[in-house]
């Protein structure tokens, strides 16, 4: 009786979810498979499946300087931006959590950059870091003759200019997520910590921080996704330059499937971008699976 | 009361609009990347002349930068929502659209108007032709081989106008000491590769240049002459300013217009910027053909192509637009504003200034006319070359030898 009703309920759920499943399979799975298949062809503008190119596109990809630079850049950019956003976000969240005056105002100011489009962010930072009209020129006009702040002008420092814009844009939302997490920490824990005479900073770092695991994971995933698909910020702030110093994988892919009219090479790049994401998903599955098994063993 | 009156008004207006519109009218959305001051003046000629023909109307679809505009066109054609007309550069950027049968065949119009007879040089119409059919209309001829010099800057630095790049490099330190930027360069990769190709043509001469880009000769690409070009390009870098990164071409031209910089190597479209700023050739600025004693002219330019549509009204309007674009009067007005040369030699050029006259003279002599690399290179290869020259410009850690080796391998792999 119960099992048949359960099966019936499952069937209902499956029927209800079928549009979702169709979209997921049709768009995501098919789309990904199609992209991967294209990367083994010689397609230029229109898809051509009659010519198998083997690994030629991958060989060219890994010998193309702009791709190699973009892979290097995304690691550097990702580590710096995620690291700085998490650190700054946590610091700001703890300050907010101390019930500062005008908390609402500060929260709005800090969260505001996240509400702005990356194109606007990028353009404003481009102007601020322009040697002719930005911060450097203003400082020099105020009398600091030796002032030098024009990271975008040199290929060695341009990526750090992009990092500044990324941190300005992303640290606020990390703060908001972590602050929500902090507010969820039981008041009694603070009282207990105070009774035990534990300094406030230690309470934050050793007691509150581990309890924020969920909020930290959310913030991290949001940041990581933002880094992988970073495109608009680069377009607005440097266009990939100077030279090819701030190229990013997503820009490489989009350039090649659009203006450069080499879809198969672009798709080879897109397939490479998929690999780290698949690795992350696999790790997630494995952790889940182990936890479930442990839970089952505990019951059994 | 007021509400009812308003609604009545609306209905009447709508009805009037419905019935007064001519049966054949169509809106033609035109995607192009002409957004700077001089370019806007030029594209307005097309728009106004087309609207003046009556019936159909020009819907302006300006998209900044050629890359973005071409991408938008390609994506919209592939996505089944093609624009009425779209700008491309004369060359191979649209060859797969022709092969895929996605473009309107203009052959009948071209034959009835005799495009073959008046469009010159024939290479620019060849770029529109596939198997004897014509699929696009060339609207102008652009050449890259111009040095734009600020006469006041050269005078105040006590230096004569240079006849070639070597002379300029010799004089550049003196210009720098006088407090000017000797060499104006922007940050877009096509600016680097364009200027580079100019030096290449001046150094190699026509035959070797065509061997390099048309026949993809690796021997030429790895020759000592090409090495010299890389060296001069690197030498020019030290005479540019710090703001070079990220600067657009017209902001860069503006440095010469406002007498902050001495020289810019840029195509003839820069003339439109000087004209729009009210500068006079020979007084405020000089255009140095080449810059070389024996200048050549490449004949690149822009074409418009017309993606196939289901609607016969639209098709009619597309053909009308194509015919208008090569009309002698429109050609004269458009090219005067744009700074480019007309695609036909029977147009009234009484308005042409000294720079345009110099260009026309070079164009009249078949020995000084060279094909544009775009005619022979795919967008993909061109992109690789642009990346290389942009990086070579920006990154002084990339040695001349390595850069030249990369250049040779790009040429070797080119289709």
Image (tube, grey):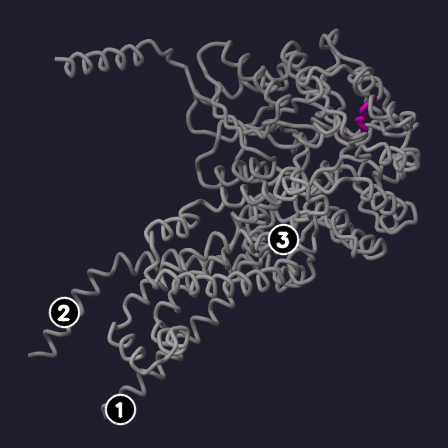
Which residue has dot 3 on it?
A: A246
- Coordinates of residue B398 in the picture (x, y in percent): 79, 56
Would residue B23 appear left or right of A164 to someone viewing this image? Answer: left
Residue B279, image x, y percentages: 73, 16
Q: Which residue is mark 2?
A: A9
Q: Quadrant of residue B153?
A: top right
Query: Residue A195's image quarter?
Result: bottom left
For this view, does B13 lie left or right of residue B337?
left
- Asked whether residue A277 is drawn in magenta, I would say no
Identify the residue under disc 1.
A298
Query: For residue B147: magenta?
Result: yes
Q: Are marks 3 and 2 on the same chain?
A: yes
Q: Quadrant of the N terminus of chain B?
A: top left
Q: Is residue A43 above or below residue B311?
A: below
As displayed, is residue A40 above or below residue B17?
A: below
Instruction: State left or right for residue B256 relative to residue A22.
Output: right
Which residue is found at the position 65% from the left and 28% from the top?
B302
Q: Residue at x 63, y 28 (%)?
A: B133
Q: Give the x, y percent position of residue A239.
A: 61, 45
- Pick the front one: B203 or A12: B203
The reply to whether callout 3 and callout 2 are in contact (CB within 8 Å) is: no
Q: Which residues are magenta?
A: B144-151
Mark with earlier residue (2, 1): 2
Residue depicted at 57% across the width and 51% down the height: A251
Which element is circle 2 on? Answer: helix
């Amino acid at each position: 009786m119960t099992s048949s009703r359960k099966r019936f309920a499952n069937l209902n759920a499956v029927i209800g979810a079928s549009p979702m499943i169709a979209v997921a399979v049709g768009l995501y799975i098919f789309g990904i498979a199609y992209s991967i298949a294209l990367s083994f062809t010689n397609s230029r503008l229109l898809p051509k499946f009659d010519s198998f190119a083997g690994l030629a596109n991958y060989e060219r990809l890994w010998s193309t300087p702009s791709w190699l630079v973009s892979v290097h850049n995304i690691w550097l950019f990702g580590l710096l931006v995620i690291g700085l956003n998490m650190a700054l976000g946590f610091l700001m969240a703890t300050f907010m959590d101390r019930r500062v005056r005008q908390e609402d105002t500060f929260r709005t100011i800090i969260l505001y950059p996240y509400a702005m489009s990356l194109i606007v962010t990028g353009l404003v930072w481009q102007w601020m870091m322009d040697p002719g009209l930005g911060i450097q020129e203003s400082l020099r006009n105020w009398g600091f003759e030796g002032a030098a702040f024009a990271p975008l002008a040199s290929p060695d420092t341009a990526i750090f200019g992009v990092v500044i814009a990324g941190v300005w844009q992303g640290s606020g939302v990390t703060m908001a997520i972590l602050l929500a997490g902090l507010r969820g920490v039981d008041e009694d824990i603070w009282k207990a910590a105070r009774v035990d005479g534990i300094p406030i900073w230690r309470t934050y770092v050793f007691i509150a921080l581990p309890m924020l695991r969920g909020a930290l994971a959310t913030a991290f995933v949001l940041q990581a996704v933002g880094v992988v698909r970073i495109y608009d910020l680069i377009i607005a702030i440097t266009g990939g330059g100077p030279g090819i110093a701030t190229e990013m994988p997503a820009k490489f892919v989009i350039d090649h499937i659009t203006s450069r009219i080499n879809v198969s090479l672009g798709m080879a790049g897109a397939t490479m971008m998929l690999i780290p994401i698949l690795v992350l998903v696999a790790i997630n599955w494995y952790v889940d699976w182990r936890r479930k098994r442990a839970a089952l063993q505990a019951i059994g | 009361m007021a509400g009812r009156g308003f609604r009545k008004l609306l209905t009447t207006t709508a009805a009037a609009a419905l019935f007064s519109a001519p049966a054949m009218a169509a809106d033609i959305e035109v995607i192009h990347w002409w957004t700077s001051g001089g370019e806007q003046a030029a594209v307005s000629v097309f728009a106004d002349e087309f609207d003046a023909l009556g019936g159909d109307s020009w819907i302006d679809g300006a998209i900044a930068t050629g890359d973005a505009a071409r991408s938008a066109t390609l994506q919209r054609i592939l996505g089944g929502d093609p624009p009425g007309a779209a700008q491309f550069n004369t060359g191979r950027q649209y060859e797969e659209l022709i092969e895929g049968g996605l473009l309107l065949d203009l052959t009948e119009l071209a034959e009835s108007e005799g495009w073959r007879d008046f469009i010159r040089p024939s290479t620019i119409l060849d770029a529109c032709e596939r198997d004897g059919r014509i699929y696009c209309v060339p609207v102008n001829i652009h050449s890259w081989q111009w040095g734009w010099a600020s006469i006041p800057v050269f005078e105040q630095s006590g230096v004569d106008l240079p006849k070639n790049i070597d002379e300029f490099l010799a004089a550049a330190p003196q210009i720098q000491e006088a407090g000017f930027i000797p060499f104006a360069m922007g940050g877009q990769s096509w600016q680097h590769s364009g200027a580079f190709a100019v030096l290449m043509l001046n150094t190699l001469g026509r035959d070797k240049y065509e061997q390099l880009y048309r026949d993809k000769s690796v021997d030429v690409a790895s020759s000592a002459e090409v090495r010299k070009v890389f060296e001069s390009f690197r030498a020019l870098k030290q005479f540019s300013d710090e703001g070079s990164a990220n600067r657009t071409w017209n902001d860069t031209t503006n440095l010469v217009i406002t007498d902050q910089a001495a020289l810019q190597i840029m195509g003839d479209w820069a003339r439109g910027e000087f004209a729009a700023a009210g500068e006079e050739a020979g007084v405020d600025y000089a255009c140095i053909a080449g810059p070389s004693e024996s200048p050549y002219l490449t004949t690149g330019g822009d074409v418009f192509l017309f993606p196939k549509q289901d609607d016969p009204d639209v098709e009619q309007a597309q053909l009308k637009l194509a015919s208008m674009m090569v009309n002698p009067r429109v050609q004269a007005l458009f090219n005067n504003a744009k700074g480019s040369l007309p695609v036909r030699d029977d147009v009234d050029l009484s308005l042409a200034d000294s720079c345009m006259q110099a260009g026309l003279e070079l164009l009249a002599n078949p020995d000084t006319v060279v094909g544009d690399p775009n005619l022979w290179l795919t967008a993909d290869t061109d992109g690789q070359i642009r990346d290389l020259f942009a990086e070579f410009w920006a990154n002084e850690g990339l040695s001349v030898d390595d850069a030249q080796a990369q250049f040779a391998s790009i040429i070797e792999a080119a289709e």
